[in-house]
Image (spheres, rainbow, N blue to C red):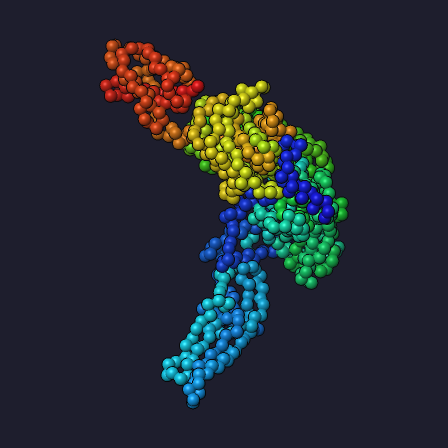
Amino acid sequence: MTSKITFLFLLFFASFFVSAQQEEISTLIRNSDVISRNKLQQRAFPDIFIYLNDTLTLPVKDDFSTNKFRKFNAEPGGPGVTQSQFKKLWDDPPVNPYPANTRFSTIQTYEILYDTLPDGTPTTTINNLNSINITVYDLTTYPFTSSQLTVWPDYNIIDTLYLPDPPETLYVTNNFIEQDSVNIYTVSPIADGSIWEDNYAYLNNRYAVNPPTVGVATLDGLNEKGYPYDFVNITAHGIADALTSKPINLSGFSASDSVYLSFMYQPMGLGNTPEAEDSLVLEFWSPAFQTWKHIWSTKGKNLHEFKNQIVPITQTQFLQNGFQFRFKNYATLSGALDHWHIDYVYLNSFRTIADTIRDDVAFRIDALTLLKDYISMPWRHFKWSPAAYVRDTLTLFQRNNNNSARLVANNYGEVFFNNNIQAQFQNVNTPSINGFTNFTTQYQLLDILNSNIPFVYDDNVNDTLAEFDVRFHFQVTPDFTRENDTIRFKQIFRNFYAYDDGTAEAAYGPQGAGALLAYKFYIAQPDTLRSVRIHFEPSVNNVSNKPFRLTIWDANGPGGTPGNIIYQNTTFSTPVYEDGYNSFHEYHLDNKILLNGNFYVGWQQVDAIKLNIGFDLNTNSQNKIYYNVGSSWQQTSFQASLMMRPVFTYHYDYSSVEEYNNLNHLSAKAYPNPANNYLTIEIEDDLNGNMLTVHLSDVSGRLIKSITTSAQKFTIPTQDLNPGIYLVELLQAQTKYAVQKIIIQR
């Protein structure tokens, strides 16, 4: 434990000193991806959902390429959901619950009698009210636990004997306990293909290094909601995650049937190294003894390739109906620490101790985008030049997990919009791949549904926020599992540019008072930047009170590095730890700014402490990340992407603007565009001496300048106009003939 404590305290105190290291990445305190996904499945007191499990039969297998975790999303009144109620207060021993509205005092209560003696002397007599024992259940967790409690009536009785009025009852206002209840919703077993009864482990494609198949189950120090098991003590250590199978029917099997459980595991991956005091543990549930039995474990260690482990199940106490197995880890409980990754879980009969090779060809890395440079970009920006943004080829990563060569055939891809197929690609090669070999398949993105023309996403889709489903498949026969022969992703177009995949594996930041961080982007035509979305991660210490200012640079520095500051917020911002969708917080610019071509988005911080922006280790935008902690810009030394996304305003600014030319056979052009000190208007059709009115308006419709002329070509001074986007309108006899957007820049 000494090494882990030293590690944590070094991380904790590092943020209070300016290190010689100018930039740093660190582990996470929480998993925002899990937090976002579980927001829809959280249940709170006074409703408790109890999910009954179906019983599995052999074989049981999961390579984690699909989600086989049980869904915890039942609703009251839903199919298979029955409701009952459980009370808090019962008699002792617990046979009957007390009625609703029952209350008891947790302190002694009394009967107080006031009287007078025959000689008129006042007297007071105090009698203890009788106590009883009750059973009290804790209703905040399930299964419910109970305790015995001695209680009294929740009132005192005051009786003035020398007066004819009835006794007075005074209720206790403190130190009382009252009847309460919870609604219990029992969800019947569902044979939905799931094999895990809990969701403490993190199903992901992000943390493992060189996995045998796409997808792993990760165990660390975070709970099923993505938060630390212990928020308070940074050195707390103990049992953390569990990955528990549903009950399995092993009755009828004996030792001679050679039932084996095998799996593959890897420490660390792209996460944190488990130390020697940490461990990964396998346990079996004995239906006969109703207890978990330790079967296998391994101590923490440095990163290595995935290893096979196979365990025989021979004892009668396990070869019964209701057998279960589970993985659990001992870890530091204060963050995303001490990672273990599990793959290829396989339980079946008639195996041998040497049966650790899967006859399986699989995708091992998921695909993220068909775009050349971005994971996501604004749809309207994409429509400027669709062919310029889509890849010509896509390389997919696969593995032959068998020990002999396999023929891989029928490689194809598909693109859907609203469940309608838009395009299809095919790789006609059927290569023979050697055993235990990682290989790639390269697709020429030629749409075979449309005469093998280069693929582009359909720019006739009118959705402002377009979304396409993309899938790739191959086929090998026979195959251990078909599920990892398909990968899929959503190509999402929003109003921002993104290099990252939306999930952080680490936190990053430059260190030093006044440090600058800049992230390079490019847009092909002018548009207005309105905000920047940033995902900040809590990592070791809370920096949510550390100020920074959003800053925009041009790319005119040496070698295309950040050059001049072209915009900086006057107001300060601080890191916000969001729990919402994608966990990005939107930081608005004090004033929108027109951008074109290459530019950098980032910040200037005040304090020396790094601000811990989310760092995506699965995409690589290293050549676009620069920091400055002194007098010059340096490219980051880490291969990753910042979770920072510039947001543009196109679908807010121009949704009501109709651009048109050649209307009513009057054609005109305005140039240069962008303009600086002047704007030339040239009417290409003959006006025949008729007067023409030119309106110059801003995008809100406010008239800035108006000129009336009969000239075919004329100049409008613009040196007095603020930089921005303007509309040029040509009108003749109150009829609008042409409209064009003009950019004014300095």
Q: Is residue 316 above or below residue 654?
A: below
Identify which residue is drawn at 58% across, 19% down.
Answer: 558
Q: Is residue 91 above or below residue 33?
A: below
Q: Please provide percent x and percent y for residue 60.
A: 64, 49
**Total labels drawn:** 0
Q: Is residue 277 left or right of residue 744?
A: right
Identify which residue is drawn at 42% across, 33% down.
Answer: 463
Q: Quadrant of the C terminus?
A: top left
Q: Please provide percent x and percent y for residue 128.
A: 52, 78
Identify which residue is drawn at 46% across, 56% down.
Answer: 76
Q: Is residue 643 left or right of residue 713?
A: right
Name of the residue lying farthest toward the bottom: 118
Q: Is residue 308 left or right of residue 417?
A: right
Q: Is residue 426 above or below residue 559?
A: below
Q: Is any atom of residue 525 visible in this view?
A: yes
Relative depth, front residue between 135 and 558: 558
Q: Is any atom of residue 241 visible in this view?
A: no
Q: Please provide percent x and percent y for residue 609.
A: 60, 36
Q: Please provide percent x and percent y for residue 20.
A: 67, 32
Identify which residue is drawn at 58% across, 66% down.
Answer: 146
Relative depth, front residue between 704 and 216: 704
Q: Is residue 203 left or right of residue 179?
A: right
Relative depth, front residue between 456 and 374: 374
Q: Is residue 505 above or below residue 668?
A: below
